[in-house]
């Protein structure tokens, strides 16, 4: 009996009856499986061996993984509306909605089809809701991009000049990166009603079991864009930017009543025409630095990175319980990210592991205020973190034995008089080096017409407009704006926060023919986490003051709570944190009473 693959649409039902199927997978909007990109992309592919045509629908999983779903074409003799060779005209692609449900149908001879020759479809043009209002496209949903969109939404506009705002990001969620470390921190002891735990055939005493409870939940620091923008007019498209083709430098004014100021082509084939463009693509960790770093080192920049590291640490912790072997972690880089990561991981592992931090410079956090550096050094020392200063990693190799995988790091001294070292470790974390994603874009017909510096950042004037492009603004890691001392502003969240405020205002001013404001960075101080109840905060308004320990930790969390994107999200997160704090307090009291009763 032939299997039937059904595609349900708001207006019609279509059936495909392939002769034989090897697997089927249901997917829909909001599931953990694959879902359609919106607007979605499709194309025909042809099996070079059999000559059969198929329809490939581009889908993406909730984790950001992209792939093509292949649908065999039905025979024209099928007694219903069919998907046939003229599907571009007959199949109502644009009627798909969030209620789309489909079943993937892959025939026996379809295995390996994604590598078959494909017939490229022409780009699909994004349809803006209104014809006359200015079209603002924001590339990147980090601090710079999302907060610019929210700033535009908060301003007062004349009805005929209120912009249509489209936010594009390759991820489904906004990530509050300064709090990624809290995904790893936790380790609250939770008493269990049993005296032992059986794991992998072994029995362990309850006193050795420690439940790792993250200090924050993923939704708190990584809310979905759809949720954040639900009460706004900002539209969101999850896709990767592929090609940027500005034309405002050619004299086209870009107003809504004339030609566009340029186009953006997305990976799915969607083409966006814009009047105003904001470049806020951010950056990613540069891993391909030394032999083996790209293959064996883990970055720590995205939510996926944090969850992957947490999962890896859990595996190592289970191994430690079963075999008693200590966990070894090497962290490359002792800037803010490396030091915060070292303090957090060392606190989590405690006496079950050894954390080593490697830095080419002779000190940790060389750009940090002295108070923050001293507080961090004190915490690292108390947690027995080994600092290998004045060394750089020459190579990373993988080795394995019968028990587990290990990695070998070859260290070379940065100065004379020091000996090279060889380290064996279970885990390598890489926190040095980054590359702006703006430099990864492709020119469509000619070289990218943007002035970029050596790092691939757009050169801007003091109003954050890209030089030579009156319709393009750049901020955050995509911008190379210099401060009053001539130094390029650091790629920090604080800089992006402030630039987003100015970018939103200057877009309002440009659209309304008002003077633009020059951006001036105001350093409000620096903060760093040093564990679940430890942090260092150096506010700029009081010279020499550094808040450490629980006070610094509380001040840091309050500051970041205030900086969360929307009022609704701030309220939900604040209530969640209060609830967790109460539960932890009760658990702590219960643990203390248990020890008193047991006489320990």
Image: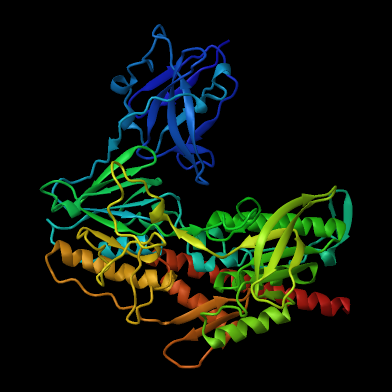
Residue 214 location in percent, x, y?
A: 63, 64
* Above or below, comparing residue 294 to residue 29 in the picture: below
Residue 199 located left or right of residue 357: right
Residue 316 location in percent, x, y?
A: 75, 57
Q: Nearer the viewer, residue 233 or 393?
A: 393
Check the picture and name the quadrant holding the C terminus.
bottom right
Is residue 188 visible in the rendered structure shown here?
Answer: no
* Above or below, comparing residue 183 to residue 592 in the picture: above
Q: Nearer the viewer, residue 282 or 439?
A: 439
Q: Quadrant of residue 120?
A: top left
Image colouring: rainbow
View extreme (front): residue: 416
**Residue at 88% across, 79% down:** 599
Residue 284 location in percent, x, y?
A: 49, 58
Residue 223 location in percent, x, y?
A: 46, 57
View extreme (top): residue: 77
* Above or below, comparing residue 254 to residue 376 in the picture: above
Check the picture and name the quadrant holding the N terminus.
top right
Is residue 406 visible in the rendered structure shown here?
Answer: yes
**Residue at 42% across, 25% down:** 118
**Residue at 45% across, 50% down:** 172
Q: Quadrant of residue 188?
A: bottom right
* Count of number-bearing discs: 0
Residue 53 located left or right of residue 576: left
Q: Nearer the viewer, residue 20 or 450?
A: 450
Q: Nearer the viewer, residue 434 or 20?
A: 434
């Amino acid at each position: 009996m032939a299997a039937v693959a059904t595609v349900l649409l708001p207006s019609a039902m279509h059936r495909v009856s392939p002769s034989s199927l090897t697997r089927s997978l249901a997917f829909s909007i909001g599931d953990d499986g694959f879902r359609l990109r919106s607007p979605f992309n499709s194309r025909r592919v042809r099996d070079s061996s059999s000559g059969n045509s198929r329809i490939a629908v581009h889908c993406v999983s909730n984790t950001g993984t992209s792939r093509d779903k292949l649908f065999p074409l039905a025979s024209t003799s099928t007694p219903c509306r069919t998907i046939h060779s003229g599907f571009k005209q007959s199949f109502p692609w644009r009627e798909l909605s969030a209620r789309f449900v489909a079943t993937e149908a892959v025939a026996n001879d379809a295995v390996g089809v994604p590598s078959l020759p494909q017939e490229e479809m022409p780009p699909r043009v994004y349809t803006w809701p209104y014809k006359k209002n200015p079209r603002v496209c924001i590339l990147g949903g980090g601090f710079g991009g999302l907060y610019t969109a929210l700033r535009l939404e908060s301003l007062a506009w004349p009805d005929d000049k209120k912009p249509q705002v489209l936010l594009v990001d390759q991820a489904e969620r906004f990530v509050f990166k300064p709090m990624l470390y809290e995904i790893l921190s936790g380790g609250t002891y939770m008493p269990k009603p049993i005296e032992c735990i059986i794991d992998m055939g072994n029995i362990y005493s309850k006193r050795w079991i420690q439940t790792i409870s993250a200090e924050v939940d993923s939704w708190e620091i990584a809310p979905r864009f759809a949720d954040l923008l639900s009460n706004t007019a900002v539209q969101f498209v999850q896709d990767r930017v592929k090609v940027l083709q500005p034309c405002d430098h050619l004299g086209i004014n870009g107003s809504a009543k004339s030609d566009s100021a340029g186009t953006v082509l997305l990976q799915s084939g969607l083409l966006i025409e814009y009047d105003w463009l904001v470049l806020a693509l951010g950056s990613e960790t540069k891993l391909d630095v030394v032999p083996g770093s790209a293959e064996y080192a883990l970055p720590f920049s995205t939510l996926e990175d944090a969850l992957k590291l947490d999962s890896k640490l859990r595996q190592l912790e289970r191994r430690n319980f079963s075999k008693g072997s200590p966990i070894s972690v090497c962290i490359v880089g002792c800037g803010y990210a490396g030091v915060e990561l070292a303090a957090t991981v060392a606190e989590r592992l405690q006496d079950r592991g050894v954390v080593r931090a490697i830095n080419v410079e002779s000190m940790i956090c060389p750009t940090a205020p002295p108070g923050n550096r001293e507080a961090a050094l004190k915490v690292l020392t108390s947690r027995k973190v080994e600092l290998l200063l004045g060394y750089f990693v020459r190579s990373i190799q993988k080795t394995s034995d019968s028990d587990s995988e290990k990695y070998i790091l070859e260290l070379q001294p940065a100065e004379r008089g020091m000996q090279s070292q060889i380290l064996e470790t279970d885990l390598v974390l890489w926190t040095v080096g980054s590359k702006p994603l703006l430099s990864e874009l492709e020119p469509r017909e000619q070289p990218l017409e943007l002035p970029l510096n050596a790092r691939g950042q757009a050169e801007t004037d003091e109003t954050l407009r890209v030089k030579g492009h009156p319709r393009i603004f750049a901020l955050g890691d995509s911008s190379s704006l210099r401060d009053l001392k001539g130094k390029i502003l650091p790629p920090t969240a604080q800089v992006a926060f402030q630039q987003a405020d100015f970018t939103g205002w200057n877009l309002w001013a440009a659209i309304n023919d008002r003077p633009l404001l020059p951006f001036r960075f105001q350093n409000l101080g620096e903060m760093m986490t040093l564990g679940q109840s430890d942090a260092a905060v150096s506010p700029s308004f009081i010279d020499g003051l550094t808040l450490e320990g629980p006070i610094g930790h509380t001040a840091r969390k309050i500051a970041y709570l205030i900086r969360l994107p929307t009022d609704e999200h701030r309220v939900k997160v604040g209530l969640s944190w209060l609830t967790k704090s109460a539960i932890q307090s009760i658990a702590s009291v219960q643990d203390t009473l248990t020890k008193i009763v047991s006489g320990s």
